Each structure stands twice: as structure tokens, then as C-alpha cells.
Amino acid sequence: MVLVSGSGTNLQALLDAAADEGYGARIVAVGADRDGIEGLARAERAGVPTFVERVPDHPSREEWDRALAARIAEHKPDLVVCAGFMKILGAPTLTSFPVLNTHPALLPSFPGAHGVRDALTYGVRITGCTVMLADAGVDTGPIIAQEAVRVFDGDDEHTLHERIKTVERGLLVDTVGRMAREGWTVTGRTVRLGRTAGLG
């Protein structure tokens, strides 16, 4: 299951990878918090079921949290992947499913909505991207994989973020595939791949 809010470039990379039976993962559905986005169109072109659960359609954020979790549960996913999903997930989803998320920095450095800008402002020479299991905090979940990206002289937020997104896309696809084929275990903050049976 993949959740999207925008153009769905990470989703497309996952759809392309999942077209190969050897990848090991299948996208059972794509959910969104907005109508009319390219991410949903990508899923529909690939023949993947979609749904939209909008926050304004519910009397409270808590009601939306419960409704989203119920919609996800209808598809019985083994893993929920946030691929550019711009809403913080509530307890009903986080406690019911393992949720994968990405961040455009090397956590625990530069968490939050402006990881690329914050890294540039700080003056680091190496930044990167992180794939993690989401928890109730902001970019505080157990880290699964990371990859470094150099900061070049003359980089601005846009140029650096574009390079990070390219690396992030590959890291996400690789991580989801490995989790599907090899399984994973979590001990405290340590995530290890390949210790359990693969996803169904």
C-alpha cells in the first residue's frame, strides 16, 4: 500500500519495480489525501486500486485518522509506504501497520519539513536521505537505510533537493524490495533486514 499527496514520482518508481515478479512486492492500493493528483493517475494507469480520504470531509482530525486507517485495512497491506504523503499519520494507522517513510537528510540531523534547507544553512558538506519506520514523532522512527549525498559549492535548496530525491527514490525502491523478499525485525531502534519470512 502506498500513500501519496502529489505527483507520485516515488510511487512510479515502486510501480515500475513491482512490475518485475522478482522484486517481491506488490502494490495492493494507492491512497491519497487529495483528489485530482498525478499520483492517483499513475496508479490508475497501472491498474492499481485507489482511494481518497480528505481531512475536510471529516468533523475532526481524529475522525480522519480513524477513517484513513479503516480504508487502508480494507486492502490488508503488509506494509504502508508514505511516498510524498504530506499528512502526519495518527495512532490508528501507526499502531495497526508498519509504516515506511523517507526524509531528505541523514537523520537524526535536520528533521522536520525543511531538512534540505536546514542542512544548507548549517553548512554541512555531506547530507543525504533516510528510509525509516514511522512512529508518532516527527522523523524519529527507527532508521532502516541511509545514503549520503555531497553538497556542492553553489548548491541551493532546489538543486540539492533534486539530487537527494534521485538517490532517495532508489533507496526507497531497494528497501521496500528487500523488506518484501527478506522480511525484517526491529529491536529497540535497530532494524535488521533478512531475519524473518518475507511479506505475504
Image (cartoon, rainbow, N blue to C red):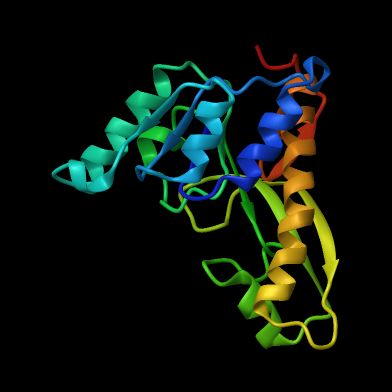
Q: Is residue 100 left or right of residue 172?
A: left
User: Residue 179: x, y in percent?
Assistant: 74, 28
Given residues 61 and 24, the one toward you in this image is 24
Q: Is residue 76 left or right of residue 8?
A: left
Point 36% across, 30% down: residue? 69
Residue 98 in sight here: no
Residue 87 in sight here: yes
Is the residue 2 above or below the residue 49 in the image? below
Is the residue 52 above or below the residue 77 in the image? below
User: Residue 70: x, y in percent?
Assistant: 33, 24
User: Which image quadrant for residue 120?
Assistant: bottom right
The quadrant of the rendering that contains the C terminus is top right
Point 58% across, 27% down: residue? 79
User: Residue 117: x, y in percent?
Assistant: 62, 78
The quadrant of the rendering that contains the N terminus is top right
Q: Is residue 189 left or right of residue 88?
A: right
Is the residue 171 above or below the residue 15 in the image? below
Q: Is residue 23 left or right of residue 29?
A: right
Residue lying at the far front of the rendered structure: 45
Point 53% across, 66% down: residue? 112
Residue lying at the far left of the rendered structure: 59
